[in-house]
Image: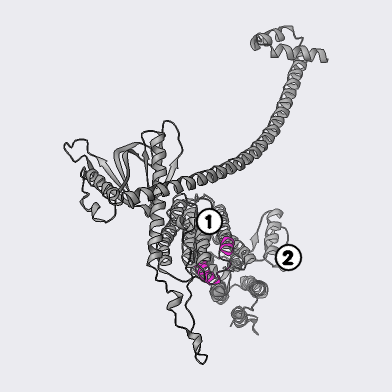
Amino acid sequence: MADTGNRLRKMLESPSFDPANYVKQLSQQSDGDRDLQEHRQKIQTLADETAQNLKKNVYKNYRQFIETAKEISYLESEMYQLSHILTEQKSIMESITQALLSSDKDETAKEMQAAFPKETEEGKQRTLTTLLEKVEGCKNIMETPGRYLVYNGDLIEYDVDNMSVIQRVHAFLMNDCLLIATWLSVRRGAVRYKYNALYDLDSFATVNVKDNPPMKDMFKILMFPDSRIFQAENSKIKKEWLEILEETKKNKAVKERRKKEEDVPRSPVRDRPDVSSNPFLEAEPVASEEVVDLSLEWIQELPEDLDVCIAQRDFEGAVDLLDKLTEYLKDQPVTQPVKDLKSKVDERVRQLIDVLVFELSPDRSLRGGPKATRRAVSQLIRLGQSTKACELFLKNQAAAVQTAIRQLRIEGATLLYIHKLCNIFFTSLLETAKEFEMDFAGNTGCYSAFVVWSRSAMKMFVDAFSKQVFDSKESLSTAAECVKVAKEHCEQLTEIGLDLTFTLQSLLVKDIKAALQSYKDIIIEATKHRNSEEMWRKMNLMTPEALEKLKEEMRNCGIGSFEQYTGDDCWVNLSYTVVAFTKHLMTFLDEGLKLYFPELHMVLLESLREIILVAIQHVDYSLRCEQDPEKKTFILQNASFLYETVLPVIEKRFEEGVGKPAKQLQDLRNGSRMIRVNPESTMSVV
């Protein structure tokens, strides 16, 4: 048997296998249906084995893929660590080399300046004046005293978004600023460039752009919120630009620091009065002469580092730098250099806040849920902007909830749509509440804003709910089921201490009241219509099944004594009108109790009273007008069913569902139940 299976497998796996020819030969050689069934079974067995082997191979490959992915992840982590270590080593080596070179350059510069002080300064200014004569619109550049040219050269500017060539420019690096001039291709004569932009060295940061052929030899200038990319002629010139820009910025910072230190007045010790010569005079407190050391490298580079962090969206890094500076300046005297530094930092803080506010704006993508806003919210709180963070967070979530509700597809079945609507809304509200509690745990003053927002969000939900349930004139039973679903979802919020049940009820009370009154009017009109056709005849349900069904319906309504009103065979000793009225009244009560809350107490009670009055008045009128004693007896039996059986059940079920007795219904029954037999054996209702 196994050999037969192997031969069949080899034949089917053969590259020259012809299915049509195989079927033809098989049909010619088979002895009958049984032989074909056996061949079919063999092929099916091979197919099952093949599928099983394929499944095993898939699982095996999948496990290998997972193991390979884990190994790749480990290797990636190790490579990242190795790259980080190499980068740190390279940075340290460059810092050492730069320090050695700068010390040599400083000594050489001092010697040259000592030898030729005036000639060097005048030569630099003459060179700058000669070059700026070729630039249109730069007459006021030389008005700043002490400004001279450091470096200049041609560059090509590219578009930041699509990396397309914009224009050819010429950059002039001066000791305190950077001038960008565009090239005039159609202009002849001395003027060859046109003024484009002038940047203070403290207002931008320079970033090297990694070569990605064909885009190479580029560097970026970051000026929040914009940036510009330039391409040098070759890698050597690019390196010179980066080095000279960095060196010029450092020289400017050192020069400003020295100037500020020279401007700080210092009182020598010998100028102080000798207060110890008179022991009877109290010593006056001596002002602190400590000067904050702002020459540290990280403080000098702080404004630029903040610009880089903001441009690269490293919000955490930017706030960490600000916290570090605040901690360093704590309990330090506020000198003029400190004020200048703070003014520069405050400008970056405003830029950072603007970026974080934009991150939380509702115009941004709303995907990711409340957790997507955590990063911007946490940094705004760290910057002391908890109120603004709370306001933007709640606006963002309101827009997200509104968008989710708007995108929900309206189903044909109302109850199915309400299930989806409640699931989306209350799940979003629960996630928002948990995220709010996590983000604003230390800001208890923001919780009132969240409660107000929750009420407005609930109103948004009720608008969509009412539009689908009440505006579309759904049946009262459907409306009751939908309200029940909404209540159950709303009660889930109490797990986190948020109870919006009262808010939901207060927003729905108007629509539910209108629905109850509308359904009440329908029942009253239907009862009046049946009363107009009343013949006061016994019901004949024709079949025992129909009678049993009616008994079951009455038992479900709470009328357990209905058996006493059934007669022989399939007869019921009640009229069609009274039985139909009882069904509708019980249904209205059940649906009304599902929709009930305290604000609807009188509405439901008055509606029941109006419906019952229609039946009572009809019985009263029929007893007064009917002359046939037999029919009067039958009417009296129906009236007894209403007064003695139906109305007590209504009162009991209302009290059980509401928790309060239905005094108005009791008064109605006691005041109307005056059916008696007079001495002449005539029946009447007083």
Residue furthest to the right in view is 1
Taking the image as shown, residue 504 lies to the left or right of residue 27, namely left
Q: Is residue 22 above or below residue 277?
A: above
Taking the image as shown, residue 93 lies to the left or right of residue 255, namely right
- 438 drawn magenta: yes
Give the residue drawn at x 48%, y 75%.
288
Residue 449 visible (yes or no):
yes
Residue 680 sits in quarter: bottom right
Q: Secondary structure at mark 1?
A: helix
Residue furthest to the front in view is 115
Taking the image as shown, residue 162 lies to the left or right of residue 4, namely left
Q: Is residue 264 above or below residue 214?
A: below
Task: Report the quarter where the C terminus lies.
Answer: bottom right
Taking the image as shown, residue 36 lies to the left or right of residue 587, namely right
| Callout 2 touching callout 1 (CB < 8 Å) | no
Label 2, on which residue? 563
Residue 640: x, y in percent? Answer: 66, 74
- 682 drawn magenta: no
In primary-sequence order, the first of circles 2 and 1 is 1
Residue 242: x, y in percent? Answer: 41, 43
Q: Secondary structure at mark 2?
A: helix
Label 1, on which residue? 375
* Extent of the magenta region: 434-455
3D distance between C-alphas at marks 2 and 1: 71 Å
Q: Residues within 10 Å of mark 2 (few under 14, many from 20)?
A: few
- Amino acid type, callout 2: Glu
- Amino acid type, callout 1: Arg
Q: Is residue 623 above or below residue 95?
A: below
Residue 283 visible (yes or no):
no
* Main secondary structure type of the part rendered in magenta: helix
Give the residue drawn at x 80%, y 12%.
4
